[in-house]
Amino acid sequence: MENVTSLVRPNIASLKPYSSARSEFTGENKILLDANENPFELWEMEKINRYPDPLQTNVKQIIAQIKGIKPEQLFIGNGSDEAVDLIIRCFCEPASDRIAIFEPTYGMYSVCATINNIGVEKYLLKDDFCIDADSFLNRVTKDVKVVFICNPNNPTGNSQKFGVIEQILSEINGLVVVDEAYIDFCSDKSVVSLVNRYPNLIVLQTFSKAWGLAGARIGLAIANRQIISILNRVKFPYNIGKPSLQILKNSLSNKALMEKFIAQITGERQNLYEQLKQFSFITMVYPSEANFLLVKTTNAQKIYTYLLDKNIVVRNRSHEPLCSNCLRITVGTPAENQILIETLKKLNL
Ligand SMILES: Cc1ncc(COP(=O)(O)O)c(C=O)c1O
Protein backbone atom coordinates (compact mmCIF):
# COMPACT_ATOMS: atom_id res chain seq x y z
CA MET A 1 0.00 0.00 0.00
CA GLU A 2 2.07 2.90 -1.33
CA ASN A 3 -0.07 5.99 -1.40
CA VAL A 4 -2.72 6.15 1.30
CA THR A 5 -3.86 9.60 0.29
CA SER A 6 -5.36 8.05 -2.87
CA LEU A 7 -7.89 6.37 -0.55
CA VAL A 8 -9.35 9.66 0.71
CA ARG A 9 -12.83 10.57 -0.53
CA PRO A 10 -12.49 13.27 -3.23
CA ASN A 11 -14.69 15.78 -1.36
CA ILE A 12 -12.52 15.36 1.74
CA ALA A 13 -9.27 15.66 -0.25
CA SER A 14 -10.42 18.99 -1.67
CA LEU A 15 -12.02 20.22 1.58
CA LYS A 16 -10.97 23.65 2.81
CA PRO A 17 -10.94 22.94 6.56
CA TYR A 18 -12.59 25.26 9.05
CA SER A 19 -9.97 27.53 10.53
CA SER A 20 -10.68 27.97 14.24
CA ALA A 21 -9.67 31.10 16.12
CA ARG A 22 -7.65 29.17 18.68
CA SER A 23 -5.72 27.37 15.96
CA GLU A 24 -4.45 30.77 14.85
CA PHE A 25 -3.71 32.16 18.31
CA THR A 26 -3.59 30.15 21.51
CA GLY A 27 -3.65 33.23 23.67
CA GLU A 28 -0.24 33.66 25.31
CA ASN A 29 0.10 37.37 26.24
CA LYS A 30 -2.58 38.51 23.82
CA ILE A 31 -5.85 40.38 24.17
CA LEU A 32 -8.20 37.84 22.71
CA LEU A 33 -11.11 39.49 20.91
CA ASP A 34 -11.30 36.92 18.16
CA ALA A 35 -13.50 34.00 19.26
CA ASN A 36 -16.59 35.54 20.85
CA GLU A 37 -15.67 34.06 24.22
CA ASN A 38 -16.70 35.45 27.60
CA PRO A 39 -13.74 37.62 28.72
CA PHE A 40 -14.41 36.99 32.42
CA GLU A 41 -12.79 34.04 34.11
CA LEU A 42 -15.79 32.69 36.00
CA TRP A 43 -14.34 29.41 37.20
CA GLU A 44 -11.21 28.46 39.08
CA MET A 45 -10.08 26.15 36.33
CA GLU A 46 -7.47 27.86 34.25
CA LYS A 47 -8.89 29.94 31.38
CA ILE A 48 -12.06 27.87 31.00
CA ASN A 49 -13.67 30.94 29.40
CA ARG A 50 -11.33 30.42 26.44
CA TYR A 51 -11.57 27.72 23.77
CA PRO A 52 -9.08 24.85 24.12
CA ASP A 53 -6.09 24.18 21.87
CA PRO A 54 -7.74 22.53 18.83
CA LEU A 55 -4.73 20.27 18.23
CA GLN A 56 -3.92 19.52 21.89
CA THR A 57 -0.24 20.24 21.21
CA ASN A 58 1.18 19.97 24.74
CA VAL A 59 -0.48 16.78 25.76
CA LYS A 60 0.35 15.14 22.43
CA GLN A 61 4.02 15.60 23.19
CA ILE A 62 3.65 13.69 26.44
CA ILE A 63 1.60 10.88 24.88
CA ALA A 64 3.93 10.60 21.89
CA GLN A 65 6.85 10.07 24.24
CA ILE A 66 5.01 7.33 26.13
CA LYS A 67 3.96 5.59 22.91
CA GLY A 68 7.32 5.98 21.15
CA ILE A 69 5.89 7.90 18.19
CA LYS A 70 5.97 11.48 16.86
CA PRO A 71 3.27 13.96 17.96
CA GLU A 72 2.25 14.35 14.29
CA GLN A 73 1.34 10.66 14.26
CA LEU A 74 -1.28 11.22 16.94
CA PHE A 75 -4.95 12.21 16.77
CA ILE A 76 -6.89 12.79 19.99
CA GLY A 77 -10.61 12.17 19.77
CA ASN A 78 -13.73 12.48 21.89
CA GLY A 79 -13.28 8.82 22.79
CA SER A 80 -11.90 6.43 20.21
CA ASP A 81 -15.47 6.28 18.91
CA GLU A 82 -14.87 9.70 17.36
CA ALA A 83 -11.93 8.27 15.44
CA VAL A 84 -14.00 5.32 14.18
CA ASP A 85 -16.62 7.70 12.82
CA LEU A 86 -14.06 10.10 11.31
CA ILE A 87 -12.10 7.34 9.57
CA ILE A 88 -15.28 6.08 7.94
CA ARG A 89 -16.36 9.58 6.94
CA CYS A 90 -12.96 10.55 5.53
CA PHE A 91 -12.26 7.43 3.53
CA CYS A 92 -15.54 5.70 2.63
CA GLU A 93 -17.76 7.04 -0.13
CA PRO A 94 -21.42 6.66 0.92
CA ALA A 95 -23.45 4.13 -1.06
CA SER A 96 -20.41 2.63 -2.79
CA ASP A 97 -17.48 1.86 -0.46
CA ARG A 98 -17.65 -0.66 2.35
CA ILE A 99 -15.93 -1.63 5.57
CA ALA A 100 -15.05 -5.17 6.69
CA ILE A 101 -15.43 -6.50 10.22
CA PHE A 102 -14.80 -9.84 11.92
CA GLU A 103 -17.76 -10.99 13.98
CA PRO A 104 -18.48 -11.10 16.84
CA THR A 105 -16.94 -7.70 17.54
CA TYR A 106 -17.49 -4.19 18.91
CA GLY A 107 -20.75 -2.81 17.54
CA MET A 108 -19.74 0.77 16.73
CA TYR A 109 -17.91 -0.08 13.49
CA SER A 110 -21.18 -1.24 11.90
CA VAL A 111 -23.23 1.50 13.51
CA CYS A 112 -20.94 4.29 12.25
CA ALA A 113 -20.80 2.70 8.79
CA THR A 114 -24.57 2.35 8.61
CA ILE A 115 -25.16 5.94 9.75
CA ASN A 116 -22.91 7.05 6.91
CA ASN A 117 -24.60 4.72 4.37
CA ILE A 118 -21.50 2.55 4.05
CA GLY A 119 -21.99 -1.20 3.53
CA VAL A 120 -20.54 -3.68 6.03
CA GLU A 121 -18.90 -6.93 4.89
CA LYS A 122 -19.09 -9.35 7.79
CA TYR A 123 -16.59 -12.17 8.16
CA LEU A 124 -16.96 -14.75 10.89
CA LEU A 125 -14.10 -15.43 13.29
CA LYS A 126 -13.08 -19.08 13.60
CA ASP A 127 -14.42 -21.14 16.53
CA ASP A 128 -11.33 -20.14 18.54
CA PHE A 129 -12.20 -16.47 17.77
CA CYS A 130 -9.12 -16.06 15.53
CA ILE A 131 -9.25 -14.43 12.09
CA ASP A 132 -8.96 -16.74 9.09
CA ALA A 133 -6.78 -14.34 7.09
CA ASP A 134 -6.48 -16.51 3.95
CA SER A 135 -10.21 -17.02 3.68
CA PHE A 136 -10.83 -13.31 4.34
CA LEU A 137 -8.30 -12.15 1.75
CA ASN A 138 -9.78 -14.54 -0.84
CA ARG A 139 -13.31 -13.34 -0.28
CA VAL A 140 -12.99 -9.64 0.51
CA THR A 141 -14.35 -7.41 -2.28
CA LYS A 142 -12.54 -4.47 -3.84
CA ASP A 143 -15.18 -2.12 -2.40
CA VAL A 144 -13.71 -2.53 1.09
CA LYS A 145 -11.81 0.63 1.99
CA VAL A 146 -11.36 0.00 5.72
CA VAL A 147 -10.89 -3.25 7.65
CA PHE A 148 -11.55 -3.14 11.40
CA ILE A 149 -9.65 -5.56 13.64
CA CYS A 150 -10.49 -5.35 17.33
CA ASN A 151 -7.43 -6.51 19.26
CA PRO A 152 -8.00 -7.79 21.95
CA ASN A 153 -11.49 -8.39 20.67
CA ASN A 154 -14.66 -7.26 22.38
CA PRO A 155 -16.63 -9.38 23.38
CA THR A 156 -14.40 -12.46 23.06
CA GLY A 157 -11.35 -11.13 24.94
CA ASN A 158 -8.70 -12.82 22.79
CA SER A 159 -6.03 -11.17 20.66
CA GLN A 160 -4.97 -11.92 17.09
CA LYS A 161 -1.52 -13.05 16.04
CA PHE A 162 0.88 -10.32 14.87
CA GLY A 163 1.47 -12.29 11.65
CA VAL A 164 -2.24 -12.34 10.79
CA ILE A 165 -2.51 -8.57 11.22
CA GLU A 166 0.61 -8.05 9.11
CA GLN A 167 -0.68 -10.36 6.38
CA ILE A 168 -3.90 -8.34 6.11
CA LEU A 169 -1.97 -5.05 6.24
CA SER A 170 0.31 -6.07 3.41
CA GLU A 171 -2.26 -7.71 1.15
CA ILE A 172 -5.33 -5.45 1.45
CA ASN A 173 -5.71 -2.45 -0.83
CA GLY A 174 -7.15 -0.23 1.87
CA LEU A 175 -6.79 0.89 5.46
CA VAL A 176 -6.54 -1.47 8.41
CA VAL A 177 -7.78 -0.11 11.73
CA VAL A 178 -6.52 -2.08 14.73
CA ASP A 179 -8.67 -1.11 17.71
CA GLU A 180 -6.52 -1.58 20.80
CA ALA A 181 -9.05 -0.34 23.38
CA TYR A 182 -7.98 -3.14 25.75
CA ILE A 183 -4.28 -3.28 24.86
CA ASP A 184 -3.07 -1.99 28.24
CA PHE A 185 -4.15 -5.32 29.70
CA CYS A 186 -1.70 -7.15 27.35
CA SER A 187 0.65 -4.38 26.18
CA ASP A 188 3.17 -6.63 24.37
CA LYS A 189 0.45 -7.34 21.78
CA SER A 190 0.31 -3.74 20.49
CA VAL A 191 1.00 -3.11 16.80
CA VAL A 192 1.86 0.58 17.32
CA SER A 193 5.45 -0.16 16.31
CA LEU A 194 4.17 -1.10 12.82
CA VAL A 195 2.82 2.36 11.96
CA ASN A 196 6.13 3.43 10.48
CA ARG A 197 6.26 0.32 8.29
CA TYR A 198 2.63 0.23 7.08
CA PRO A 199 1.21 3.55 5.81
CA ASN A 200 -2.28 2.00 5.75
CA LEU A 201 -2.31 1.12 9.48
CA ILE A 202 -4.35 3.11 12.01
CA VAL A 203 -4.13 2.02 15.65
CA LEU A 204 -6.89 3.12 18.01
CA GLN A 205 -6.34 3.29 21.75
CA THR A 206 -8.38 4.78 24.56
CA PHE A 207 -8.05 6.26 28.01
CA SER A 208 -11.48 4.83 28.92
CA LYS A 209 -10.34 1.42 30.15
CA ALA A 210 -6.99 0.89 31.93
CA TRP A 211 -6.51 4.62 32.53
CA GLY A 212 -9.95 4.90 34.13
CA LEU A 213 -11.05 8.02 32.23
CA ALA A 214 -14.21 6.78 30.46
CA GLY A 215 -16.12 9.83 31.66
CA ALA A 216 -13.56 12.25 30.23
CA ARG A 217 -13.99 10.85 26.67
CA ILE A 218 -10.45 10.66 25.32
CA GLY A 219 -9.29 8.28 22.63
CA LEU A 220 -6.33 8.11 20.26
CA ALA A 221 -5.65 7.29 16.65
CA ILE A 222 -2.02 6.55 15.86
CA ALA A 223 -0.97 6.42 12.21
CA ASN A 224 1.30 8.03 9.66
CA ARG A 225 1.14 11.82 9.57
CA GLN A 226 -0.81 11.99 6.28
CA ILE A 227 -3.72 10.07 7.76
CA ILE A 228 -3.60 12.09 10.99
CA SER A 229 -3.69 15.36 9.10
CA ILE A 230 -6.78 14.19 7.19
CA LEU A 231 -8.57 13.34 10.45
CA ASN A 232 -7.59 16.73 11.87
CA ARG A 233 -9.05 18.53 8.85
CA VAL A 234 -12.46 16.95 9.36
CA LYS A 235 -12.83 16.78 13.16
CA PHE A 236 -14.82 19.40 15.05
CA PRO A 237 -12.48 22.33 15.77
CA TYR A 238 -12.47 22.04 19.57
CA ASN A 239 -13.23 18.36 20.01
CA ILE A 240 -11.59 17.90 23.43
CA GLY A 241 -12.62 20.20 26.27
CA LYS A 242 -10.14 21.79 28.67
CA PRO A 243 -11.38 19.86 31.77
CA SER A 244 -10.80 16.57 29.94
CA LEU A 245 -7.36 17.69 28.78
CA GLN A 246 -6.46 18.71 32.32
CA ILE A 247 -7.61 15.36 33.71
CA LEU A 248 -5.63 13.60 30.99
CA LYS A 249 -2.47 15.56 31.85
CA ASN A 250 -2.85 14.69 35.53
CA SER A 251 -3.27 11.02 34.70
CA LEU A 252 -0.29 10.95 32.37
CA SER A 253 1.88 12.35 35.15
CA ASN A 254 0.87 9.40 37.31
CA LYS A 255 1.41 6.45 35.00
CA ALA A 256 2.27 4.29 38.01
CA LEU A 257 -1.35 4.52 39.18
CA MET A 258 -2.57 3.17 35.86
CA GLU A 259 -0.05 0.33 36.10
CA LYS A 260 -1.40 -0.44 39.57
CA PHE A 261 -4.96 -0.58 38.17
CA ILE A 262 -3.83 -2.98 35.47
CA ALA A 263 -2.09 -5.31 37.93
CA GLN A 264 -5.14 -5.30 40.17
CA ILE A 265 -7.63 -5.87 37.35
CA THR A 266 -5.63 -8.66 35.72
CA GLY A 267 -5.20 -10.32 39.14
CA GLU A 268 -8.94 -10.06 39.78
CA ARG A 269 -9.61 -11.36 36.27
CA GLN A 270 -7.68 -14.51 37.12
CA ASN A 271 -9.60 -14.98 40.41
CA LEU A 272 -12.90 -14.47 38.65
CA TYR A 273 -11.87 -16.89 35.89
CA GLU A 274 -11.15 -19.63 38.43
CA GLN A 275 -14.31 -19.03 40.42
CA LEU A 276 -16.69 -18.76 37.47
CA LYS A 277 -15.41 -22.06 36.06
CA GLN A 278 -16.83 -23.88 39.07
CA PHE A 279 -20.51 -23.21 38.39
CA SER A 280 -22.36 -26.05 36.68
CA PHE A 281 -24.41 -23.55 34.62
CA ILE A 282 -21.22 -21.99 33.20
CA THR A 283 -19.94 -24.39 30.57
CA MET A 284 -16.98 -22.31 29.41
CA VAL A 285 -15.00 -19.30 30.63
CA TYR A 286 -13.01 -18.03 27.68
CA PRO A 287 -9.44 -16.88 28.34
CA SER A 288 -9.22 -13.09 28.29
CA GLU A 289 -6.52 -10.53 27.61
CA ALA A 290 -8.89 -7.67 28.44
CA ASN A 291 -10.78 -6.42 31.51
CA PHE A 292 -13.77 -8.68 30.99
CA LEU A 293 -14.58 -12.36 30.68
CA LEU A 294 -16.89 -14.01 28.17
CA VAL A 295 -18.70 -16.99 29.64
CA LYS A 296 -20.86 -19.60 27.95
CA THR A 297 -23.80 -20.69 30.05
CA THR A 298 -26.67 -23.12 29.93
CA ASN A 299 -29.21 -20.27 29.95
CA ALA A 300 -27.83 -16.76 29.49
CA GLN A 301 -31.15 -14.95 29.59
CA LYS A 302 -32.15 -16.55 32.88
CA ILE A 303 -28.80 -15.77 34.53
CA TYR A 304 -28.84 -12.24 33.14
CA THR A 305 -32.33 -11.56 34.52
CA TYR A 306 -31.51 -13.18 37.86
CA LEU A 307 -28.42 -10.99 38.28
CA LEU A 308 -30.27 -7.87 37.19
CA ASP A 309 -32.91 -8.61 39.79
CA LYS A 310 -30.07 -8.56 42.36
CA ASN A 311 -28.80 -5.24 40.96
CA ILE A 312 -25.85 -6.78 39.12
CA VAL A 313 -25.64 -5.79 35.48
CA VAL A 314 -23.70 -7.90 33.02
CA ARG A 315 -23.96 -7.87 29.24
CA ASN A 316 -25.96 -10.53 27.44
CA ARG A 317 -24.13 -11.20 24.16
CA SER A 318 -26.24 -14.23 23.17
CA HIS A 319 -27.49 -12.65 19.97
CA GLU A 320 -23.93 -12.22 18.61
CA PRO A 321 -22.56 -14.78 16.15
CA LEU A 322 -20.62 -17.61 17.90
CA CYS A 323 -21.88 -16.34 21.27
CA SER A 324 -25.11 -18.25 21.90
CA ASN A 325 -25.87 -18.26 25.64
CA CYS A 326 -22.85 -16.05 26.34
CA LEU A 327 -22.58 -13.30 28.92
CA ARG A 328 -19.81 -10.71 29.06
CA ILE A 329 -18.76 -9.87 32.59
CA THR A 330 -16.53 -6.87 33.30
CA VAL A 331 -13.94 -7.37 36.05
CA GLY A 332 -15.07 -5.18 38.95
CA THR A 333 -13.52 -4.25 42.28
CA PRO A 334 -12.65 -7.19 44.58
CA ALA A 335 -15.82 -6.45 46.59
CA GLU A 336 -18.02 -6.32 43.47
CA ASN A 337 -16.56 -9.56 42.13
CA GLN A 338 -17.15 -11.25 45.46
CA ILE A 339 -20.80 -10.16 45.50
CA LEU A 340 -21.18 -11.51 41.95
CA ILE A 341 -19.78 -14.91 42.95
CA GLU A 342 -21.84 -15.11 46.17
CA THR A 343 -24.97 -14.17 44.22
CA LEU A 344 -24.29 -16.83 41.57
CA LYS A 345 -23.82 -19.41 44.33
CA LYS A 346 -27.44 -18.84 45.31
CA LEU A 347 -28.72 -19.49 41.79
CA ASN A 348 -30.43 -22.84 41.24
CA LEU A 349 -30.41 -23.68 37.56
C1 LIG B 1 -13.30 -2.31 21.26
C2 LIG B 1 -13.72 -0.97 21.71
N1 LIG B 1 -13.33 0.11 21.04
C3 LIG B 1 -13.69 1.34 21.42
C4 LIG B 1 -14.49 1.53 22.53
C5 LIG B 1 -14.91 2.93 22.89
O1 LIG B 1 -13.90 3.58 23.50
P1 LIG B 1 -14.00 5.13 23.85
O2 LIG B 1 -14.54 5.22 25.24
O3 LIG B 1 -12.59 5.59 23.74
O4 LIG B 1 -14.89 5.76 22.83
C6 LIG B 1 -14.91 0.44 23.28
C7 LIG B 1 -15.77 0.65 24.45
O5 LIG B 1 -16.32 -0.22 25.05
C8 LIG B 1 -14.53 -0.84 22.85
O6 LIG B 1 -14.94 -1.94 23.50
Image (cartoon, rainbow, N blue to C red):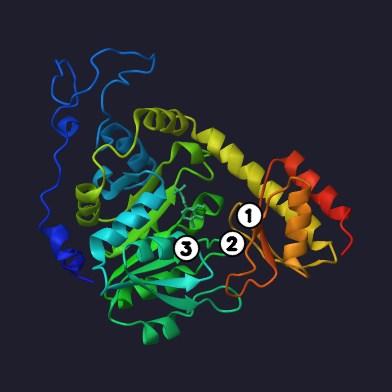
Q: Are dots 1 and 2 in contact, CB under 8 Å?
A: yes
**Is ligand 1 closer than 8 angstroms to the Cβ of mark 3?**
yes
In terms of sequence position, does the residue under pointer 1 or pointer 3 come before the other?
Answer: 3
Instruction: Where is residue 161? Give x, y as percent.
Output: 49, 69
Question: 10 Å neighbourhood of mark 2: few (<14), some, or many (≥20)?
Answer: many
Q: Is residue 282 above or below residue 144?
A: above
Report the amino acid beneath label 3: Cys
Residue at the disc numbered 1: 292
Q: Which quadrant does the N terminus fall into?
A: bottom left
Instruction: Where is residue 254? Give x, y as percent.
Output: 49, 30
- For the residues marked 2 and 3, what is the alpha-carbon distance in whole angstroms? 10 Å
Instruction: Where is residue 64? Give x, y as percent.
Output: 33, 42
Q: Is residue 50 above or below residue 278?
A: above
Kind of element beneath mark 1: strand
- Choose top left, top right, bottom left or bottom right for residue 167: bottom left
Residue at the disc numbered 3: 150
In terms of sequence position, does the residue under pointer 2 or pointer 3 come before the other?
Answer: 3
Report the amino acid beneath label 2: Gly
